[in-house]
Image: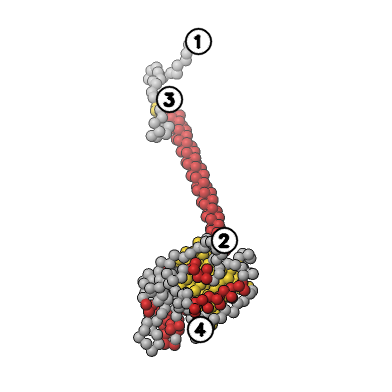
Amino acid sequence: MASIRPPSRWGAWEPQPRELRIQIMPGSGSESEVVEDLPDMRRTRWRLAVLLTSLTVLALGTAYIAASSSQTMHSHITKSTELHKEHSKQVRGHKANTSAHNSTALTMLQFNPHWECFIPANMETCGRNVFGLIDRLLQNHSTDFANIIELPSSYRPPKGWQMACRKGGGGDTACILWRSLVWEVVQPHTECWWGNGRACNIMTFQNARVSDLKVTVLGAHFPHGAGSGFYQDFVGTLRWNLKKSKNTTDKVILLADSNAGLHEKSDVGILEDLALLPPHTRVPTLWYDYRTCCYNIGFRAFFDRVAANFGKKLDLIRDDEYRSLSGDFRHAPPFAQVNFPNSNALGAFHHPILTHLVL
């Protein structure tokens, strides 16, 4: 059967094949599709179809990118939440460790600002500043126990601490301060008395958080002349009073102005004199890297002592503010540079000793 060709006014019509190249994605590098030349209407429809296809592909790509970004953001949020939870866990752990640390370590203070700091002529300069210094050392370091020598009865400890003082004749006092939220006074109460201008104070405490942790604190102002008759008599008084607490605990902390250099009496030597160390017992000892006594002699003596017959380690704490005031413990703070009354003689202010005992 013969093919039928459409009539043409201008002669026979022969379709001439031409290429119409349409790039699906501009810049994509893909090959162009080759189509036969089409009439105007069909070509327009084809172009619209291609445009619609391109828009659809672009929309799908945008949706994919958005979905990927959303997933990444969700991942970041999830990770951030996990990190926050981990941080909160670490904070809780730190608080728990701090609480545990507080029950397995003690902070202790020994300080003798000396009596001339508190006479009326020096009270507003030296005295009030010493009161503030004691408060700060207690509060900033959460100090468990302190022994303050020659502290007047007008002093009041900060909230959270209590104080009990014993007189020694001649105006001398030994005041024990303790952190009352952590420590409770238990029996027996001792009434240490030697007289002769030298005070002693012995108290026994139980930890409110750890019921089986009990300690006896000995605060003392020793007479001068280690090994002298006065020294031996004073030590005898301390030993007799310490016996009263042995049935409660054998753990003893010594906070004292020993009035003896380390070359005369070591900390271990004092503990042995007090019958607090069984033979061949090893105890932690403090390394004193500054001398505490006294302003009037240029701080040449290691008189103030902190010792214990128990524990694993005993370290010195350097309070930064006091260190700055005292020129790294080389001189007395400006407020403490006072004289004895009616005299050009310098006062005998001591540097405080602050320590940390690991149990």
Residue 169 vertical position relative to residue 107 in the rendered view, above or below: below
Residue 160 occupies quadrant:
bottom right
Instruction: Classify residue 298 by image quadrant.
Output: bottom left
Query: CA separation, marks 3 and 4?
Result: 122 Å
Among numbered discs 3 and 4, the one appearing first in the sequence: 3
**What's the residue at 47%, 38% (across, down)?**
61
- Pointer 4 or 2: first along the chain: 2
Name the kind of residue labelled 1 in the image. Met
Taking the spot 44% from the left edge, 80% from the top edge, the residue there is 114
Distance from Cα at disc 1 to Cα at disc 4: 148 Å
Tell me which numbered mark, 3 or 2, is placed earlier along the sequence. 3
Quadrant for the C terminus in the image: bottom right
In the rendered structure, which amino acid carries the disc numbered 3? Answer: Val
What is the x, y in percent for residue 71? 51, 44
Name the residue beneath numbered marker 4: 196
Dot 4: element = loop
In the drawing, does residue 273 fall left or right of residue 264?
right
Q: CA distance from mark 4 to mark 2?
A: 43 Å
Q: Are marks 1 and 4 in contact (CB under 8 Å)?
A: no
Total residue callouts: 4
Q: Nearer the viewer, residue 51 or 91?
A: 91
Q: Which residue corresponds to mark 2? A: 100
Residue denoted by label 1: 1
Question: Where residue 355 is drawn, which disc sits there?
Answer: none
Q: Amino acid at mark 2?
A: Ala
In the displayed structure, 39 sits above or below 125; it is above
Q: Which-is-in-front pick, marks 3 and 1? A: 3
Which amino acid lies under the numbered mark 4 shown in the image of this protein?
Answer: Asn
Q: CA distance from mark 3 to mark 1?
A: 29 Å
**Of discs 4 and 2, which sits in the foreground?**
4
Residue bearing mark 3: 35
Residue drawn at the location 49% of the way across and 45% of the way down: 72
